[in-house]
Image: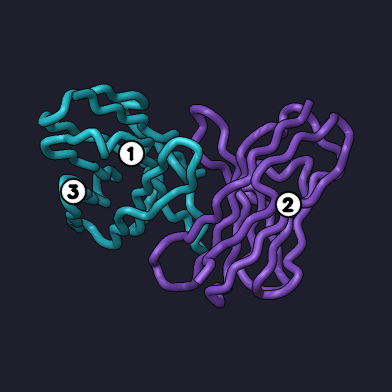
Chain colours: A purple, B cyan
């Protein structure tokens, strides 16, 4: 039972390059989320998807786009990476029961 | 806008001692979560608190929720080195969107 799988685990980008972070869950959860984690700031919500076919902005959506490809997959795209996007990115999923999130292992992204 | 604040942000303590981490939040919610994160790792769920007065315990950790005071506490009893980690509280702002506190980095020294 894999849970939430994120790829890649590490990535270095040059300013202006684009990339897509992939996330897949095998728990049949309806909701999926992308957070970024920066030192001293906890985790901040970038985008979320309450169900297949829907996406909504979170607290810090600028510079990002998302796609809920199907119920299992939720990708995060950086169209033109900036050094301010250097962070650790976590994908998470949940169902409607109040058990909180299941997190992926994270992607450590550095933009130089 | 929901804000979640933890204190302290850094805590260094000796093995065997007791201490409490506080989590305050700014707007009404009846769902609060505690997570643990080890360095370089993902977040692991510790407790789910769903109602006023809820108390959960697992080993040396005990969490409680006071929705009227908008306060949750994570109490550590007789700390051991293995509990060294960063602890986050998170509050549900609706539709299962969680707002996280800044995290408390706990270091337990022999």
For the residues bearing labels 3 and 2, Cβ distance under 8 angstroms:
no
Q: Which residue is drawn at 47% across and 60% down?
A: A101
Q: Which residue is drawn at 50% across and 72% down?
A: A1
- Mark 3 belongs to which subunit? B
Question: Mark 3 and mark 2, same subunit?
Answer: no
Mark 2, secondary structure of its residue = strand
Crowdedness near tag 3: few (<14), some (14–19) or many (≥20) residues, C-alpha within 10 Å = some
Mark number, residue B62: 3
- Mark 1 belongs to which subunit? B
Residue B74 percent coordinates (x, y): 24, 42
| Residue for badge 2 | A21
Q: Nearer the viewer, residue A80 or B100?
A: A80
* Up-down relation of residue B83 to residue B46 (above or below): above
Residue A91 percent coordinates (x, y): 60, 54
Q: Quick check: B29 left or right of A5?
A: left
| Residue for badge 1 | B24
* Up-down relation of residue A59 to residue B18 (above or below): below
Q: Which residue is drawn at 58% across and 47% down?
A: A106
Q: Which residue is drawn at 53% across and 74% down?
A: A27
- Mark 2 belongs to which subunit? A
Q: Quick check: B46 left or right of A77?
A: left
Q: Nearer the viewer, residue B83 or A72?
A: B83
């Amino acid at each position: 039972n894999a849970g939430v799988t994120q790829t890649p685990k590490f990535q270095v980008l040059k300013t202006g390059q684009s990339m897509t972070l992939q996330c897949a869950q095998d728990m049949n959860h309806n909701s999926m989320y992308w957070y970024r984690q920066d030192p001293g700031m906890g985790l901040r919500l970038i985008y979320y998807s309450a169900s297949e076919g829907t996406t909504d902005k979170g607290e810090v959506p600028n510079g990002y786009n998302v796609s809920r490809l199907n119920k299992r997959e939720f990708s995060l795209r950086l169209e033109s990476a900036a050094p301010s996007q250097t962070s650790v990115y976590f994908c998470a999923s949940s169902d409607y029961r109040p058990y909180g999130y299941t997190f992926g292992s994270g992607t450590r992204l550095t933009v130089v | 806008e929901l804000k979640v604040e933890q204190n302290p942000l850094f805590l260094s303590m000796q093995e065997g001692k007791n201490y409490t981490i506080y989590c305050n939040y700014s707007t009404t919610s009846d769902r609060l979560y505690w997570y643990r994160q080890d360095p370089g790792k993902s977040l692991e769920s510790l407790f789910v608190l769903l109602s006023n007065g809820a108390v959960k315990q697992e080993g040396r950790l005990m969490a409680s929720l006071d929705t009227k005071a908008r306060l949750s506490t994570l109490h550590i009893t007789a700390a051991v080195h293995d509990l060294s980690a960063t602890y986050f509280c998170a509050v549900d702002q609706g539709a299962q969107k969680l707002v996280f506190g800044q995290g408390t980095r706990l270091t337990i020294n022999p």
